[in-house]
Structures are given as C-alpha cells and as structure tokens.
Image (cartoon, rainbow, N blue to C red):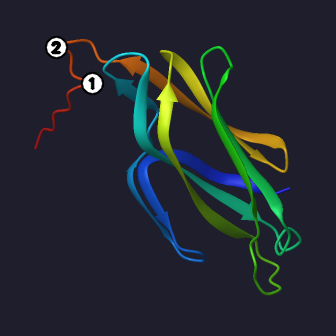
C-alpha cells in the first residue's frame, strides 16, 4: 500500500504531474471566522504518496474526510490515482493537490482532516476552528528583531 510521504493544508497549491508543486500559505492548522457557522472559501490539501515500483501503474483509491469535534462529517471526497511510469526499482512520490471550496464550518473546536489510501486511514491532520473575538487579532502578533 502506498505510504504518505507528507500531507498538509495550504491557502492554495498547484501541482503539475511529474514535477514540483507550488504552495501559498502552507501549514494551516487553524481557521478563524467571525461567528459560527461560517463558510471558509478555499483551502488546499497537499498530499505526497510514496509508491514502490510494484505499486506504480495501478489504481489506488485516495480519499479524505473532514470531521467536526464530535466526529460528524463536514465534507468528504475520493478518487482514483495512478502513477504511470517506466519500470524503475526506485520509489517515486506522486504529488497531489485537492481543493476544498466553501467549507461549511458549524462548530468551534478540534476538527480533523483524515486521509485514506485504499480504504485505510493513513494520516490525520488537526484543524482547529475558532471564532475571532471582537477587538482581538485573528493571529498572534509576530515581531522580528534584526
């Protein structure tokens, strides 16, 4: 079964088959809105699948489910992926970016993005959902000293 080399959330990602990927705002672990419920317009799930020579040129089911703090399903999707290529004894990493549009978040607290391969959960990403308090910045202030 393919292994997950990496998985993370980003503001946006672009992947070209067989090439590197481009990411804006990678490493998201918290979404903040003005009140509950709120709709987050866009987030990208970036996954790198490590495939052996035996796993190449075969279909694999890749899926994800976003769950709320109580385990309820927020959204889900799945699809088939295939890494085509010549016979090569070395492992390859298949880069995949999945766009999640208009994520409807109905509860504050610890959500999760669960990534599955061939029906088995292989990675879980935490995603904290919070409400911005009036007069409070949505992110901690960062100061840099030269």
Judging depth in this view, the residue of 49 and 67 nearest the camera is: 67
Q: Residue furthest left?
A: 146
Question: What residue do we see at 67% from left, 67% from top?
Answer: 93
Q: On the picture, is 60 further left or further right than 49?
A: right
Disc 2 is placed on an element classified as loop
Residue that appears at 51% across and 71% down: 20
Label 2 – label 1 distance at C-alpha = 9 Å
Task: Say few, some or many: other residues with alpha carbon within 10 Å of mark 1 (under 14 / 14 to 19 / 20 or more).
Answer: some
Element class at badge 1: loop
Corner quadrant of residue 40: top left
In the rendered image, residue 22, in percent from the top left (x then y), is placed at 43, 64
Outermost residue, right side:
54
Q: Which residue is mark 2?
A: 135
Q: Residue at x 61, y 51 (%)?
A: 6
Instruction: Please say if the residues under marks 2 and 1 sit with CB atoms less than 8 Å apart.
Output: no
Q: For the point 46% across and 44% down, which residue is it?
A: 43
Image quadrant where residue 2 sits: bottom right
Residue labelled with disc 1: 138
Percent position of residue 60, x then y: 82, 60
Q: Position of residue 121 (x, y in %)?
A: 78, 39
Return the x and y of residue 126 as percentages of the image width and height: 56, 29
Circle 2 crowding by C-alpha within 10 Å: few under 14, some 14–19, many from 20: few
Residue 19, relative to residue 25: is it above or below? below
């Amino acid at each position: 079964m393919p292994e997950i080399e990496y998985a993370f959330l980003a503001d946006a990602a672009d992947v070209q088959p067989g090439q590197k990927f481009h990411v804006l705002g990678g490493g998201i672990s918290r979404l903040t809105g003005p009140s509950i419920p709120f709709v987050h317009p866009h987030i990208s799930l970036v996954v790198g699948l490590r495939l052996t020579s035996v796993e190449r040129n075969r279909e694999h089911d890749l899926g994800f489910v976003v769950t709320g703090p109580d385990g309820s399903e927020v959204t889900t999707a799945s699809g088939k992926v295939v890494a085509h290529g010549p016979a090569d004894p070395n492992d390859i990493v298949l880069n995949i970016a999945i766009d999640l549009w208009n994520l409807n978040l109905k509860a504050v607290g610890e959500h999760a993005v669960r990534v599955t391969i061939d029906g088995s959960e292989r990675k879980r990403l935490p995603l904290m959902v919070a409400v911005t308090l009036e007069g409070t910045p949505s992110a901690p202030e960062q100061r840099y000293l030269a």
